[in-house]
Image: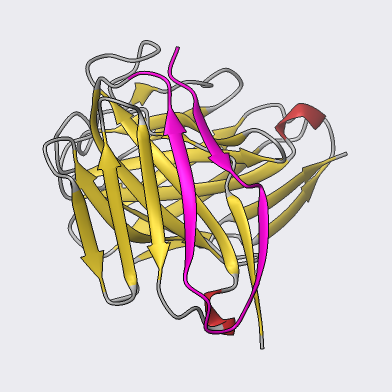
Amino acid sequence: KQEVTQIPAALSVPEGENLVLNCSFTDSAIYNLQWFRQDPGKGLTSLLLIQSSQREQTSGRLNASLDKSSGRSTLYIAASQPGDSATYLCAVRPEGNYGGSQGNLIFGKGTKLSVKP
Amino acid sequence: NAGVTQTPKFRVLKTGQSMTLLCAQDMNHEYMYWYRQDPGMGLRLIHYSVGEGTTAKGEVPDGYNVSRLKKQNFLLGLESAAPSQTSVYFCASSYSPPWGVYNEQFFGPGTRLTVL
């Protein structure tokens, strides 16, 4: 069974610090991995999607890496800002018909980030 | 572009009542999804659709029905609401199919449902 774990569950850092969020998954048979941001009371915003054949993706101050064989992904945030405060979710797309459904995106429980001014 | 929108934003139901949640997208996406988010559980897929007139079960489909009569709309129905269905419901859509390598999903703002 595919399980996605995010550590730590919560993180508080001072403004300007570089930080890394971790995501691990138990089954390496995935099509892709996606990082999302969720603000309180809001929906999810897609940040980065890494295909299974890729090692990393970058968007602005964000860099996501994927090590499929070891079942790990990291989201690196450079020069953090108070506006980065949110919950960050990672999700994997399992290969094939997972759990009787081809549509499944398996989510972690998220890391709640707080960047203090 | 409004992206993915959901109606209503909040709703309180009594046990046994029925309701329909509406999801609309203006990105001409073929594929649409309904998720529920519960504390400590993460998001879980309820149902999804691979095109107008089609629906398929996700991970937790029991107690819900869906319809996709128009490409831009995906409806989630609760015929007889139960307290266990108290949750935040998210709709999403994608251009690429869910089984594809490049399947990026775009989410709506969510509907917070409480069943008393």
Quadrant of res B56? top left
Q: For the point 17% across and 36% down, which residue is it?
A: B97
Q: For the point 23% across and 21% down, which residue is it?
A: A95
Residue A102 percent across, percent down from the top left:
28, 21
Residue B78 percent across, percent down from the top left:
62, 32
A2 relative to B22, above or below: above
In the rendered image, residue A7 lying in the magenta stretch gets the answer yes
Residue A39 percent across, percent down from the top left:
58, 67
Q: For the point 88% across and 39% down, which residue is it?
A: B116
Quadrant of res B101? top left
B9 relative to B104, above or below: below
Q: Is residue B111 left or right of residue A96?
A: right
Foreground: B46 or B15?
A: B46
* Location of the N terminus of chain A (image quadrant): top left
Foreground: A104 or A75?
A: A75
Residue B17 percent across, percent down from the top left:
76, 35
A55 relative to A14, above or below: above
The part of the chain drawn in magenta is: A1-27
Foreground: B48 or A45?
A: A45
Q: Is residue B12 left or right of residue A80?
A: right
B8 relative to B78, above or below: below
Quadrant of res A71? top left
* Location of the C terminus of chain A (image quadrant): bottom right
Q: For the point 50% across and 78% down, which residue is it?
A: A80
Outermost right residue = B116
